[in-house]
Amino acid sequence: MSDNNSLKTQKLIIGLFSILLLVVLIIVAGVEMKLSRKPEVIVDISGDNKRCVTCHTEKGIALKAIDHWKQSLHAQQNISCTDCHTAKKGDFDAFYCPESDFLVAKHPTPKDCAECHAQQVDEFADSKHAHQFWLIKNADRSIFENPISTKHGCEQCHAIGNVWPDQSVGECDACHPKHTFSKAVARQPETCGECHVGPDHPHIEIYLESKHGNIFRSQEKKLDLNFSSKDGKPIPIDIPVCTTCHMDGNETQPMTHNVSARLAWESQAAWSFRTVWMADKLGDWKMKRSRMEDICKSCHSPEFVDSYLLTADLTNLQYNEIRRLMVGWNKKLTEKGIIKRLEKDGKFYSDVLLNGWDEVPEILMYHAWHHEGRRFRHGAEMMGADYTQWHGIWELQHDMVEMFTFAAEHGDPEAKKWVESTDPIKFAPYALYDIPGNAFGINVLSNTVPYVYKAYPDYWDRIKANVEKAYQNNVLTQNQFAFWIKRFENKEHYIGTKYKADSVMKKYTDLDSIDTKAFTKEAVQLELPGKPFWNW
């Protein structure tokens, strides 16, 4: 009996604890649901704005726009329809709402936004986002592409720098969506990725490939991107999004809507050059670089930042030497009459330095800048290894090979000599830049790979001369050159030649030989007995 009583007592206790646990879970779930619900915002809709909302609601027109506005900070601050859609007679976008005497503006412009956000509008107008290079130099759009294709193509993205009839510049809702004007949406990487995407500037792909993007994806659901970065406090999120590096502030840098304020290279251009954009307001490229470094050092050590950015800088300079080769050969082939420029009635419509779409060397040169060359540089700047490598330098080298092959086939003796050469160094027919080691660590085995390290005992002396010339030409700072020299003087350490890893090397070469035997037996030497369907 005592055992039965004990068992009943245990069951009772377990039952009570189960009920208690269930009650606790219900309470916790209720609290979580309450916390997850957005507090209902009481929006004051009165006067003319009430007429707008009432009419739109009754007619069922743009109801979601009203819902979005009600969620916005504008609505909470009683900034309503007519505050943004104000119009005067004669305004380019003024019109009367149907069945009303309301004169409203169809297109609120940055001039309207500047009534409250003057600093942001001014900063934006001074940025490269606002610069209408696609209108000033748009031969590809005006010649190679038909007009309808650009309406929802180049024009849709470049509307971020729209020049309005009221002389204001920009399209604020390109980043801050109508009508919430959400900061969180503007900070979401995919918002930038609406335009910064594709073969010529795959920044969203590069970002998502990088460690930055990788960590962002793992933490995305936890992040609150609707924060203010105006108060000089540390960046409140653990991993950078696009705006963190290019716009948001921290303890040392103010928040800015000028995305050019921290850019030290014009690496989207046909040639990489240090930025001179708005130097009177923003300072020289060294000042812009220092701003970016301050942001980088929020997360990274100074040595990592110095090493990584210097390597990216040398990548930009390396691109210039490849560009120099492509341009030089296109000029040469043009002068020899092997390729021709587009012209009508004595006017040339293609520039041998920039564009050309109907002959192979011109197309290769264009891609080597506008596609492969940008990916090569931007991948190096944004930690996108695959874009520096396979989508970048690999494709650039193929452009070069195809150009020399075309020239050889069309009778150029120098190109024919290059094509027929079996010397491996032919794939570096331009000056080289390099840096001992990398930003990530020391790999003792990596020095066993590069052909030039072995074939040219004076390799690093040649590289030193090139880096020093870049420094003298003011495209590297004194500190950067000193950093490079420090690595050069201790290059055996940074490259790894100072250290031996014979046992590790043997371990992996032995494993590799096992792999080799396996695929040789299972694939290379396999002969199928079935009769073939095609006889050679």
Image: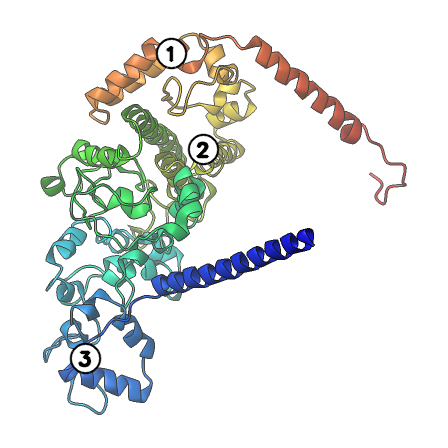
Badge 2 density bin: few <14, some 14–19, many ≥20, Cα 10 Å: many
Identified by mark 1, the residue type is Lys
In the image, 114 versus 523, the foreground residue is: 114
**Image position of 64 (left or right of 497):** left
Q: Give the residue at x 20% y 25%.
A: 474
Q: Mark 2, mark 3: which one is toward the viewer?
A: 3
Residue 526 occupies which quadrant of the picture? top right
- Earlier in the chain: of badge 2 and badge 3, it is 3
Q: Secondary structure at mark 3?
A: loop
In the image, 286 versus 277, the foreground residue is: 286
Residue 339 visible in rendering: no
The residue pinned by badge 1 equals 491
Q: Are marks 3 and 1 in contact (CB under 8 Å)?
A: no
The residue pinned by badge 3 equals 45
Identified by mark 2, the residue type is Ile
- Earlier in the chain: of badge 2 and badge 1, it is 2
Q: Which mark is residue 393?
A: 2
The spot of residue 515 in percent (x, y) is 70, 24
